[in-house]
Amino acid sequence: SSSVKEETCDENDSDENVSDENDIDENDIDEHDSDENDSNENDIDEKDQIDCILNGCRSIKNYKKLNKISEGTYGTVFRAKNKKTQKIIALKQLKNFSNIRHEGFAITSLREINILLQLNHENILSIKEVIVGKHLNDIYLVMEYIEHELKMLLDNKSPSFTISELKCLLKQLLNGVNYLHTNWVMHRDLKPTNLLYSNKGILKICDFGMARKFSHIDNPNLTKNIVTLWYRAPELLLGEKCYTNKIDMWSIGCIFAEMILKKPLFLGENEVDQMWKILNLLGLPDKETYPKFYEYPFISKNKDLFKKKKIKMNVNNIRSHFPNIASQFLGLYLSDIGLDLLKKLLHFNPQDRMSASDALKHPYFNEFPKPLEISDMPIIPDSNKVIRSNKLSNQYNFINQNTIMFRS
């Protein structure tokens, strides 16, 4: 299913990008967003399914909020406690858009509930139950609590993950996405802020507000307003509507690069700037193997500019960004085999972009040092206990950093 295309997204699809870099503003939500053009039978009765779920929901009174973890366009996540069992959980309060929507809360919230209830995998954040507040449209998702957001660990360089540990994290990410794609689900917003790290060494993919079911049938009415800008595949930037699940694989390539660099690979300020940064690093794709690329308006209109900026076909500068031997300061590097994996994940042509199942078989994971066992991954002081916001994450400092532990 590596090259199949999504069937179920219409032009008025709305976004849920929860990080603060280049996210869509709440004011940009289309009040006419609906599933009228949606052709996937699994999504036709989403609202009826959710109504059935909500009628049997328990109350928010069973939980006590402890602190806010993060806030995005479509919801706020709290660290909370089950009053009866005293167990710590994550509580996602779905935002109510009754002022601009007849249905009360966003269709993306319905999809998130619907999809999460169908998924069951170690690397996918699990939903425990759906609960309600004082009113029926005051909806909360009770989810397993995970101690860390991977983005914060990368930004704060604490701990400084080793190559073996990063390989373990990347392999888990690929396992989770392979499960999604095998079950006909595209995440459509993969980025480090949507990846969690538990003190059991497990990586979890979260935030399925933009996720959609897909099939092998082409649909020309797909929204391109998905995926946070820095992790957005070139075909989306160029306006492609019949995109495939390979957009997730491009995002994984960007995340892989960021794990090594400790910063995003493509820091575009807008869609045009993002495209230029990609072209400057990767060059132009081969005209014979990917002729469609040169048919996009942005590309066809800027041929002279490519010459002026000295952007050439098949000239890839990505090696210049990554040391191929261990740095004396960080010890992070990208071997030639690792670079091969990265290039295949960041392939311009989505048909030739590596699938998750193939990436898991790549020799990078058999090369020394091999991925660390999950049971040997580091234990880090709980960073989600601290009251913070996404915008302050870069300034956040871990308390008592010397207490990072490793299992014996």
Image: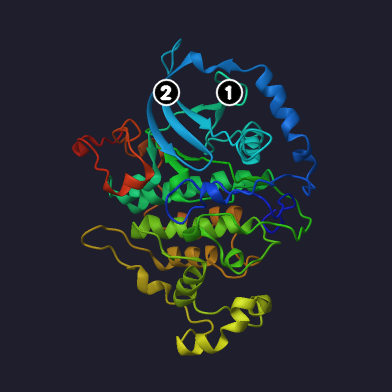
For the point 50% across and 59% down, which residue is it?
Answer: 229
SS at badge 2: strand
Residue 405 in the figure: left or right of residue 355? left
Q: Residue tagged by mark 1?
A: 129
Q: Give the image quarter of residue 319.
A: bottom left
Q: Is residue 200 visible?
A: no
x and y, in percent, of residue 334 in the image: 37, 63
x and y, in percent, of residue 14 in the image: 62, 48
Q: Is residue 348 above or below residue 48?
A: below
Residue 230 in the figure: left or right of residue 52? left
Q: Give the image quarter of residue 405.
A: top left
For the point 54% across and 26% down, which residue is it?
Answer: 140
The quarter of the rendered structure image containing the C terminus is: top left
Which amino acid type is shown beneath numbered disc 1?
Glu
x and y, in percent, of residue 28 in the image: 57, 51
Residue 335 in the figure: left or right of residue 173? left
x and y, in percent, of residue 245 in the image: 64, 55
For the point 35% across and 38% down, which residue is it?
Answer: 376
Q: Residue tagged by mark 2?
A: 80
Q: Is residue 7 above or below residue 134?
A: below
For the point 47% across and 42% down, which residue is it?
Answer: 72
